[in-house]
Image (spheres, rainbow, N blue to C red):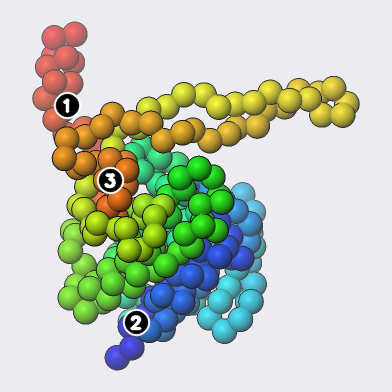
Amino acid sequence: MQKRILVTNDDGFESAGLHALVEALRPLGHVTVVAPTTEKSACGHSLTLTRPLRFVQIADDFFKLDDGTPSDCIYLSKYALFEEGKMPDLVVSGINNGSNMGEDITYSGTASAAMEAVLQGIPAIAISQVYDGGPASIQRYGYTLAQKYAHDIAKMILEGGFPLGERRFLNINIPPIKAEDCKGMKITHAGYKMYGNDAHLHRNPRGEEYYWIGTHVLEWQPSQNATCDLSAIEQNYVSITPIKLDMTAHDDIQRLNDWIANG
């Protein structure tokens, strides 16, 4: 039986990264695409609850979800486009234009689509192409390396099963290099990214103030032997991080119990 693959992203249905991903996955099974109408970067794991959503068909098995989020795309696709017993075998979200590493995973619409998939019981991958100095690096390197790893890892999952437990997904980041310069894959943990403030104050023609939030440079606490995602990318490895949705700080539970008892 042909495998069923559901593809989405957070850069919008016209994104070159999305179309590169579809091209890479088509040899593996039947691909259905449901993507946001517009860019939804950094929308997090949000669902649209205050307005109706509409599927707009662009081509065979290719839809945009009118003003929906990546999580909306997965949530609604499962019930609107797939029959009971014929659900997707795999969700792949990407190829994102830009990194999703460290705590940025919590902002990411790309990662959140994978989160929604595993909540719905579907194995999932989120894949992102890291920049090395702005969007021009996408033009310089293209998506060849990302396509290769998206295809190869999806193939392993479809043929051999998903390697993680329930409510967990694979977060993959691709270094901004030529394919021949890649050192291979490294299994990593999410890094400790350093954050600042990149909000810019401007005035419109009527003199009213407004802010525009920018982007942060990739700064982090280095990990020994490049075991975190950010360090692995710096050393020209493809980073593959297993992510779980249980955000409980388990090692703090006893400390918190003691604090309450002694309060």
> Could you say whether the residue bearing mark 3 is in a helix, strand or loop?
loop
Q: Quadrant for the N terminus, please.
A: bottom left
What distance separates the C-alpha of mark 1 from that of mark 2?
43 Å
- Badge 3 is on which residue? 235
Task: Give x and y (percent) for residue 189.
Answer: 23, 43
Q: Residue at x 30, y 32 (%)?
A: 192
Q: Is residue 86 visible?
A: no
Question: Residue 246, position in %: x, y?
Answer: 25, 44
In the picture of the structure, the residue carrying the numbered disc 2 is: 28
Q: As drawn, is 165 to the left or to the right of 213?
A: left
Secondary structure beneath dot 2 equals helix
Amino acid residing under circle 2: Leu
Farthest residue, direction front: 180
Question: What residue type is disc 1 on?
Answer: Asp
- Estimate the spatial distance between the alpha carbons at disc 1 and disc 3, rounded to whole Å: 33 Å
Q: Earlier in the sequence, mark 2 or mark 3?
A: 2
Q: Are marks 2 and 3 in contact (CB under 8 Å)?
A: no
Camera-near label (2 vs 3) is 3
Q: Look at the numbered discs 1 and 3 and tell me whether their residues touch, using CB distance below 8 Å.
A: no
Residue 10 image offset from top left, x and y in percent: 52, 56
Tag 1 residue: 252
| Residue at 57% across, 84% down | 60
Name the residue nearer the viewer: 41 or 145. 145
Is residue 17 something that shows in the picture? yes
The local crowd at label 2, few if under 14, some if 14 to 19, many if 20 or more residues have their Cα within 10 Å, is: some
Mark 1: give few (<14), some (14-19) or many (20+) Cα within 10 Å. Answer: few
Residue 4: image quadrant is: bottom left
Task: Using residue 138 as the reference point, say whether residue 167 is left or right of it.
Answer: left
